[in-house]
Amino acid sequence: MKMKELLLFLSCVLSVSADALHSGIAILACSASDGEYMYGLDGEELAYADFNKQEMIYPQPPFIDHGTYPGGYEAAVANVQICQQNLKVVGEDMKDFPPKHIAPSVMIYTRDEVEFGEENTLICHVTGFYPAPVNISWTKNEQKVTGSSINTPYLNTDGSFRQTSRLDFTPQVGDIYRCAVEHLSLTDPLTKIYEVDSSARSDPGVGPSVFCGVGLTLGLVGVAVGTFFLIKGNECS
């Protein structure tokens, strides 16, 4: 959704429990010209409507036997249209009550342990914000990078939202990555930095240094013990 349009934002959320171990959620949200429609289960996004591609998207990995929602996209379109009609009706009454904006918190980390030259994924996790969504962009060494992905906003239990952006990368020493987050609550983007440095892997010289240090320590102990017995022997004579 366009950020400025979220000043008129209406969301309809349905949360249900299938049993004591599982909880599902369906999110419908709209602005004056855009919408969100998503299904989730146990905190995972199962499906969402892509109104540009005009189809339901199932973001789970291909090896997972995920379910499908026949007629899901058509239902999403119909529900977003209803949401937008409702938004027109209540928009005039809500003009004097601007929505409360809650700023996000951001963290950046790698999917796997870093190995130089080995492909990995940087994850920028944004949570605790309202309303949805946020805009996330990436730079590498001050240069804008493309190819990142971002999931649809997901509802937290406290009514705020969370979103995650992922960027595939190959770690090289000295590279600096930045994740910049834009939101209605922020006057300037909120930025987190990930820097690839030599501490990302063990120094091959650490092992020999440790062994040399241990050897030197044992040698000094041996000299001290020998000197002690030599002195004692001289006293006895």
Image (cartoon, helix red, strand yellow):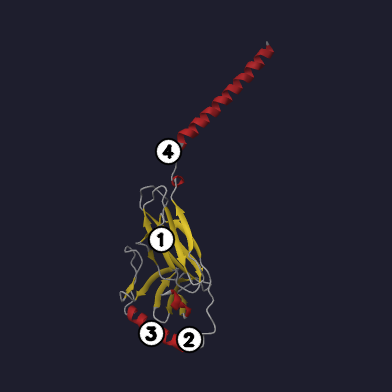
Q: What residue is shown at x 41% (from left), y 61% (from top)?
A: 138
Q: Nearer the viewer, mark 4 or mark 2?
A: 2
| Label 4 – label 2 distance at C-alpha | 64 Å
- Tell me residue 179's x, y (percent): 44, 60
Which quadrant is home to the N terminus? bottom left
Q: Which secondary structure, mark 4? A: loop
The three-letter amino acid code for the residue at tag 1 is: Trp
| Label 2 – label 1 distance at C-alpha | 35 Å
**Which comes sooner in the sequence, label 3 or label 4?**
3
Q: Nearer the viewer, mark 1 or mark 3?
A: 1
Q: Which secondary structure, mark 3? A: helix
Q: Is residue 234 left or right of residue 31?
A: right
Evaluate if marks 1 and 3 touch, with contact meaning CB atoms under 8 Å apart.
Answer: no
Is the residue marked by circle 4 packed among few (<14), some (14-19), or many (20+) residues within 10 Å?
few
The three-letter amino acid code for the residue at tag 3 is: Gln
The three-letter amino acid code for the residue at tag 2 is: Gly
Q: Nearer the viewer, mark 2 or mark 3?
A: 2
Q: Which of 104 and 138 is in front in this view?
A: 138
Is the residue marked by circle 3 packed among few (<14), some (14-19), or many (20+) residues within 10 Å?
some
**Which comes sooner in the sequence, label 1 or label 3?**
3
Q: Nearer the viewer, residue 117 or 65?
A: 117
**Which comes sooner in the sequence, label 1 or label 4?**
1
Q: Residue furthest right?
A: 235
Q: Mark 1 points at which residue?
A: 138
Is the residue marked by circle 2 packed among few (<14), some (14-19), or many (20+) residues within 10 Å?
some
| Label 1 – label 3 distance at C-alpha | 33 Å
Numbered tag placed on residue 91 in the rendering: 2
Q: Mark 3 points at which residue?
A: 81
Q: What residue is shown at x 37% (from left), y 55% (from top)?
A: 169
Numbered tag placed on residue 54 in the rendering: none
**Which comes sooner in the sequence, label 2 or label 3?**
3
Q: Name the residue under label 4.
A: 204
